[in-house]
Image (tube, rainbow, N blue to C red):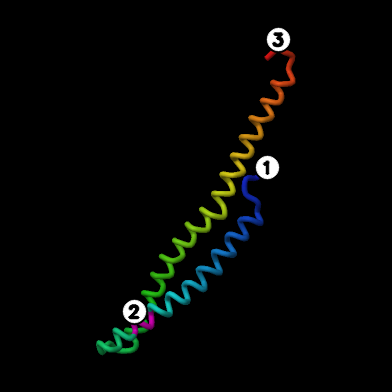
Amino acid sequence: MQKLVKESEYFLAWLVFQVCTTVGGAVLGGVAGGVLGGILGGAGVDLNSIKWICGGTGILLGFVLSFFFFRLFVDRMIVKKAEMRAAELLLGSRNQEAADVARLPPGER
């Protein structure tokens, strides 16, 4: 039986997901940490607390970003291909059945 999604397609989806979440998480964490650190520093919060607050915020934002990228890449790179291949297999089997019926003598159809 033919697989709907090849291992190479899983690997490619995982690789693109990892690159996007790593780069996106670094950018989002850096921007959010800078803004939040500036606000907290201006409010007079000590540096140790700012590190912990900004680090925790960056991790939480990374989780959220990772979830959205996961949904995006699974939907676009895995599910859509599997749906297309399943439809092709279904239509292919129906076309084969129609061709088999067409080959039957008129009295056996």
In this view, 68 is above or below 49? above
Marks 3/1: CA–CA distance: 35 Å
Residue 99 location (% of width, % of height): 71, 26
The residue that label 1 is drawn on is 2
Mark 3 or mark 2, earlier in chain: 2
Q: Quadrant of residue 90?
A: top right
- Locate the N terminus by quadrant: top right
The residue that label 2 is drawn on is 53
Relative to 43, 60 lies left or right: right
The residue that label 3 is drawn on is 107
**Looking at the picture, which amino acid does disc 2 mark?**
Ile
Mark 3 or mark 1, earlier in chain: 1
Residue occupying the far left of the picture:
43
Relative to 108, 31 lies left or right: left
- Proximity of marks 2 and 1: CB atoms separated by less than 8 Å: no
Magenta-span inclusion, residue 36: yes
Q: Which mark is residue 29?
A: none
Magenta-span inclusion, residue 85: no
Mark 2 or mark 1, whichever is nearer to me: 1
At mark 2, the secondary structure is helix
In the depicted view, which residue is nearer to us: 19 or 109?
109
Mark 1: give few (<14), some (14-19) or many (20+) Cα within 10 Å: few
Q: Which residues are magenta?
A: 33-37
Residue 39 location (% of width, % of height): 29, 84
